[in-house]
Image: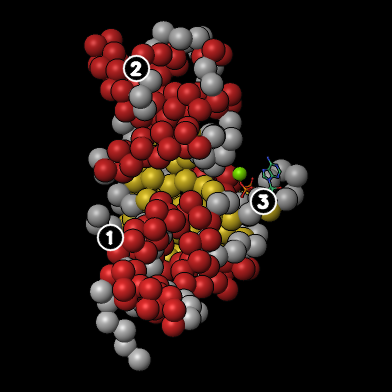
Amino acid sequence: MTTRLILEICNVRHVYATGSNGLAGCSLNIRQGSRNALLGANGSGKTTLLQQLNGLLRPTSGAILIDGAPLDYSRNGLAALRRRVGLVFQNPDRQLFSASVCEDVSFGPLNLGLDEAEVRERVAQSLAAVGMTAMAERPVHHLSFGQKKRVCIAGVLAMRPEVLLLDEPMAGLDGAAQTELLAVLDDLSGRGITIVLSTHDVDFAYRWADDIHVLAAGRCIASFDAGRLPEQEVALQAAGQSLPAVVELCRVLVARGMLPPTAAAPRSLDQLAASLADMPSRHFVETLPLGAAAHSYCDGRRGWTRRH
Ligand SMILES: Nc1ncnc2c1ncn2[C@@H]1O[C@H](COP(=O)(O)OP(=O)(O)O)[C@@H](O)[C@H]1O
Ligand SMILES: [Mg+2]
């Protein structure tokens, strides 16, 4: 991944017609090819920001740059922007409007004026990327919520975007559908697509993202490498977020001497389980408040030598 910035959000304010503040001087940068989580509570400005990034909303003040140049809000400028930066809405029913899956995914490429063969190829590739090839002819209203989300992503992918924006992609999905969607996102990010998604789930942001941007009251109050999240307790608290469960658990295990303090911090419960599995069982026996009998038992069973 490069450190080249593909999107720069510079002190963006957005005031809705009702007078409410959507964004109140928000600044953050998106690195090309990176996985970004916009983390914040309800009403912190995540949706407003995502809609700013593909030009659906325009800053009341401040600016957004793509490749260093300010967004061009002319008709042609917006069409060009939306080819490069695609947005998947939180609610798929807001995005899907054609009768069948295939028709819906074809809509964008047809609008680009591409020839039929190119449209067919793009639709086939996009449906394959989200694992929906077998459902191409299905009526959209026969799909599950998770399948609709994947069709929305396919519709955006058919435009071959460089940046994929997803508003709360995990919300409303059950565990299996979340796992499937994560595999799709992993694949896209592996192909170099920059991903920016919104979430209020700190555990997910920590597990998934390269860069986390914490939003509170319309501003980005902290942007950091996700691995450094444990140092960001103050910003998280200010945004109404707690530390990820895995970080809390690691702290307890380190305090009890069950994990060495130098161990690389696991980012998920699976990684934590793997680090624990790597620890010699003797370490546990010596650190747990067990009596001499337990030590002798272990010594006898495993032939360990006890240190005093
Ligand atoms: N269409 C709208 N009209 C007026 N105010 C809005 C609208 N959408 C959002 N807001 C306000 O803007 C702020 C940020 O909202 P939003 O971007 O939806 O936050 P999030 O996605 O983090 O929940 C909130 O105070 C919200 O009430
Ligand atoms: Mg929202």
Q: Of marks 2 and 3, which one's residue comes earlier in the chain? A: 3
- Ranked by sequence position, the earlier of labels 1 and 2 is 1
Mark 3 and 1 residues: CB-CB less than 8 Å, in contact? no
Disc 3 Cβ-to-ligand 1 distance below 8 Å: yes
Identify residue for label 3: 43
Question: Residue 268's spot in the image, x, y percent?
Answer: 42, 56
Mark in the foreground, 1 or 2: 2
Q: Secondary structure at mark 3?
A: loop
Q: For mark 3, does the 10 Å Cα neighbourhood hold few (<14), some (14 to 19), or many (20 or more) residues?
A: some
**Residue underneath mark 1:** 3
Q: Quadrant of the C terminus?
A: bottom left
Can residue 154 be seen in this snapshot? yes
Q: Is residue 219 visible?
A: no
The tag on residue 304 is none
Measure the C-alpha gap from mark 2 to mark 3: 36 Å
Above or below, 90 against 203 in this view is above
Q: Position of residue 212 (x, y in %)?
A: 45, 59
Residue position marked by numbered label 2 in the rendering: 133
